[in-house]
Image (spheres, coloured by chain):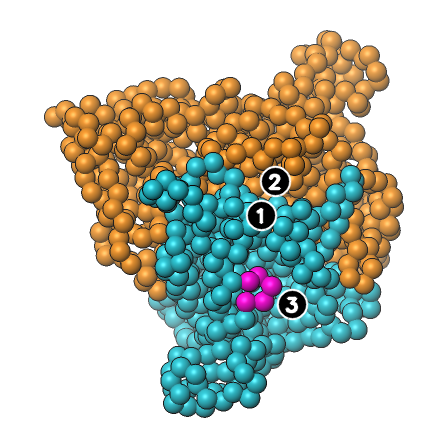
Chain colours: A cyan, B orange
Amino acid sequence: MEPLLHQVGQRLIRCAPRTLICRKYTNGNGHSTDHPSTGALHTTPILLVSRLYQPANLRDVGQESRQPGEMTCKSQRLMQQSGLIHPSNPGCYYYLPATVRAMEKLVRLIDQEMQGIGGQKLDMPSLCSAELWRSSERWDLMGKELFRLQDRHGVDYCLGPTHEEAVTTLVAHQASLSYRQLPILLYQITRKFRDEPKPRFGLLRGREFYMKDMYSFDVSEEAARRTYESVCHAYARLFSRLGLRCLRVQADTGNIGGTLSHEFQLPADIGEDRLLVCGGCSFAANEETLPSGETDCPQCHAGPLAESKGIEVGHTFYLGTKYSRIFNATFSNPQNRPVVSEMGCFGLGVTRILAAAVEVMSTEEAIRWPGLLAPYQVCIIPPKRGSKGAEEGGAQTEGLVHTLQGGLPRLRGEVVLDDRTQMTIGRRLKDAVRLGYPYVVVVGQGALEETPRFEVICQQMNETMFLSKDQLVDLLGRVETV
Amino acid sequence: MEPLLHQVGQRLIRCAPRTLICRKYTNGNGHSTDHPSTGALHTTPILLVSRLYQPANLRDVGQESRQPGEMTCKSQRLMQQSGLIHPSNPGCYYYLPATVRAMEKLVRLIDQEMQGIGGQKLDMPSLCSAELWRSSERWDLMGKELFRLQDRHGVDYCLGPTHEEAVTTLVAHQASLSYRQLPILLYQITRKFRDEPKPRFGLLRGREFYMKDMYSFDVSEEAARRTYESVCHAYARLFSRLGLRCLRVQADTGNIGGTLSHEFQLPADIGEDRLLVCGGCSFAANEETLPSGETDCPQCHAGPLAESKGIEVGHTFYLGTKYSRIFNATFSNPQNRPVVSEMGCFGLGVTRILAAAVEVMSTEEAIRWPGLLAPYQVCIIPPKRGSKGAEEGGAQTEGLVHTLQGGLPRLRGEVVLDDRTQMTIGRRLKDAVRLGYPYVVVVGQGALEETPRFEVICQQMNETMFLSKDQLVDLLGRVETV
């Protein structure tokens, strides 16, 4: 296994064969990726931009995968052009590695918030039997939105777009469930399927997408409403941690059913939902829930409702006993009598949140992520090969990487080195700005001074600073990761 | 939000409403789960067994979900009886929360090993167009094993059981790919679909399952064979870290195609594959690759081949240009001429590894996991409520939990407290043995002595020790987690 050679500045750096990493940049403790007992990842602290699979030059697949009705929007365009996603069938996308990283971060955040309110994660089959869906009458009700298929025995299935039937059946199968065991909050983060008539806007309205769906089982309507509020608060915390402004609006219950429902909406011009928001109080509603032409706030009666557009990123439903009655999901009350559980269901569009965040935070030319979700936190740009001071700059880069590795274990896997040193700093900086790394560190002329200074561009704040190595380590040490 | 009251021993412990955790057991820094900026998980260090959704009393769903041909085995029986999985449609299972935890750990291990050899994780659609599969002729070749469906426009799709066509198309769409950018190793860990004629053995042969599939693109056959070996080594490391004996055997290439193939097999009585293993050298082969009746080792010719049964948990293929030719996946060589890439593909059965590990490590009555995969590492059993010394034992339990939280952040989320103190220690210990927590800590009579001793059962080593608190913390501090 011959090591490959990469050049950073004019210094040669030995790289592990067929990997993304530079051995020269490991912390020198002699760990090898062949060591059987330590995780191989422990030795992959720095990633090289030249090796990342984030192709900006994927050919458009053309007609065969674009339907006449399909439209594009900023997030779709930016994400396709930057090697984040690539179209496959209509409404279906390859999620390329940087997107998978962002999604894994979002999943960890959602796990934290859901588990923080007692949610337990499970995973239910995508194949849902027609029998189950006929019981709830949604087999017919869902019409063409349901992907349907038969197995080799001619048995009918659908691909689950949501799992009320499946989870209620599961809980109903528990032979004895005591009131003391409730509430139960079960959730999953899995791929869902919906045969959209007009898939469009990239990940915002696809036919395959990732969704977090949680289902709650409570002893009473009062308890179920408390659970409902606690989930809504967890959603609010999630969006607050992401730095996204999110409105909770009164919503229609659609074909899920139930009596109380809210949508979580990110205000955005391309949003497909029309919202009415009161300036005088906290009231906000999806237009479809109010009488046509309504302009007076039904809550405070103090002001006219302002119109806004939104992207729905979450939806909560108080279901009552709609599903638990059908599938006989009961618990024993203190008198040991069976009582039907009160249910809620709570969705978050996982891939939709990624695209919606890019949509509302990015400029026309440059992707911006919520800090916590950025695929990589830091990009380091060393001097152009053969330029004045390239050798000294290469040494500074090496020292910096070494320091970051040793001192900031939380940034493990979060730092990339733009080793395409055949390109000017300016050209690579342009890429880094477009891709939206929260922190870009340029090892330029300042790094050659007696007290070396690094140019640091904080893209979230749109700020540029010149910092010493210690100051830079201090700054990056405060970067929040998940 | 009224706090609930739980009793451990005779001490009252305040619990957060609707959560799994005991506030009393947090480290007292006043963090609340309502705090918007810190992850809610930061305050969920101890989980209560009474609140875990691991129902051991799920009614068998009976006829509607069991096919005539379906059989059971030890892992299926143990996993169903212990609330780890629950049958849905034939060959489809609910993965209950403890299984999801084990699977997430396995996924992290696989990520480490795949990224350690340069693998980059992406995620491809489940819906695969018939057009793509017709190009490779597998649309017809796969027959009834392929789940097929039509969308609302009458377009044909299958649910991907494997993704050679999809990934090769993706890489072929890159407008300019230089030999300098190869090898590319792309993998995903996603749900796959296969309409098995006889789904059986629980997660060992299902119709929906999780698989890790990696695809490699190389400049030459020689380079592709090096990549092939590096993936095989990563697989060997993975099984070694899991403590599973795994044989690499010569295999048939089946309908995937190619010229070189190995299976990774866990020897097990219920294995569906028949292997021939040489006692004299490292040769091992799937029976189907050798002439019928062959008993002489074709490699060393020194000994008879011994028969063994195995569970296939991984499969590697050197594909050559079978798919890259069809989809025109080329790169530019140093002379700037287009050359067709040499490919490999590499599968690991993720859910199958979970079940196979349970199958080979468990007794007839008690589940054993590879240490790294156990859903929870430690179970603490305090005294029975109202028993002699229950109060003092409760205080000791509380102190222990406090110490573990403060001193062992790596065990965050890994420690459960069996708060079902209406049950005797013996009864709960029986459950803990059956569920296979690697470490069970009993707060019994020894904890009431002047120098308190905790009974520690290390289930992996089948050893019982009596340790002081310091010794216990020292022991648990050395537990490896992922």
Q: Main secondary structure of the magenta part?
A: loop
Give the x, y percent position of residue A450.
38, 69
Q: Chain of mark 1?
A: A
Pointer 1 residue: A166
Q: Chain of mark 3?
A: A
Q: Residue at x 52, y 34 (%)?
A: B59
Task: Measure how far apart labels 3 and 1 are at the Cα level.
Answer: 24 Å
- Secondary structure, mark 1, is helix
Neighbours of disc 2 within 10 Å: few (<14), some (14-19), many (20+): many
- Secondary structure, mark 3, is loop
Pointer 2 residue: B88
Residue type marked 3:
Arg
Give the x, y percent position of residue B460.
42, 24
- Secondary structure, mark 2, is loop
Q: Residue at x 84, y 40 (%)?
A: B143
| Front residue of B398 and B254 | B398
| Front residue of A177 and B315 | A177
Which contiguous range is marked in magenta? A253-257
Task: Measure how far apart labels 3 and 2 are at the Cα level.
Answer: 29 Å
